[in-house]
Image: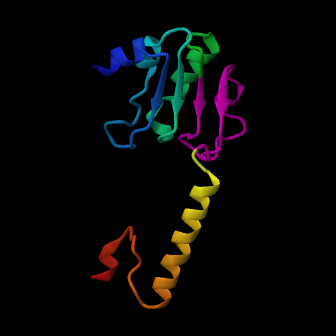
């Protein structure tokens, strides 16, 4: 199904894709304009995927039912940002997926990585493996 039809026919659209050159600004005024008047947009991916001004325009004009954002182009969202005054908008500080279990898992992973480093070993997860040559 083309993305335009998905936006036009859905009651809720959840953005959960990676930020890439192709997805930056993907959710623009054109796609938001296709949404039903009572539909909601939820972004749990990355802020720059949704054009904030286009979303604010739609919310302020009542063209969509609402939105929920857990991510913003600038983290944290500035106090004077236009989105903060929009009706029908739920904002969370990039923690919507945080649970007691996920926090425990992240903490244990960080401790295990640090112990491996202190033992002179390579941690299980390394972002820049080239440092190990």
Is residue 8 placed above or below 12 in the rendered structure?
above
* Residue 40 falls in image quadrant: top right
Q: Residue at x 27, y 82 (%)?
A: 133
Viewer-proximal residue among 107 and 81: 107
Residues shaded magenta: 67-96
Q: Residue furthest front?
A: 101
Is residue 105 placed above or below 44 in the rendered structure?
below
Is residue 104 placed above or below 21 in the rendered structure?
below
Counting from the top left corner in percent of width and height, residue 80 is at 71, 35
* Residue 74 falls in image quadrant: top right
Counting from the top left corner in percent of width and height, residue 96 is at 60, 43
Q: Residue at x 64, y 41 (%)?
A: 77
Q: Residue at x 49, y 16 (%)?
A: 11
Is residue 96 placed above or below 109 in the rendered structure?
above
Quarter of the image with the N terminus in it? top left
Whether the magenta-drawn stretch holds residue 61 is answered as: no
């Amino acid at each position: 199904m083309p993305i335009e039809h998905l936006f036009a026919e859905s009651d809720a659209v959840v953005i959960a894709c990676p930020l890439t050159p192709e997805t930056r600004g993907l959710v623009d005024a054109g796609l938001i304009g296709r949404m039903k008047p009572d539909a909601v947009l939820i972004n749990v991916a990355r802020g720059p995927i949704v054009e904030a001004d286009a979303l604010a325009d739609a919310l302020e004009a009542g063209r969509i039912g609402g939105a929920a954002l857990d991510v913003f182009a600038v983290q944290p969202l500035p106090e004077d940002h236009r989105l903060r005054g929009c009706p029908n908008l739920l904002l969370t500080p990039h923690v919507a997926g945080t649970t007691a279990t996920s926090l425990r898992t992240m903490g244990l992973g960080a401790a295990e990585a640090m112990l491996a480093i202190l033992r002179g070993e390579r941690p299980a997860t390394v972002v820049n493996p080239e440092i190990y040559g």
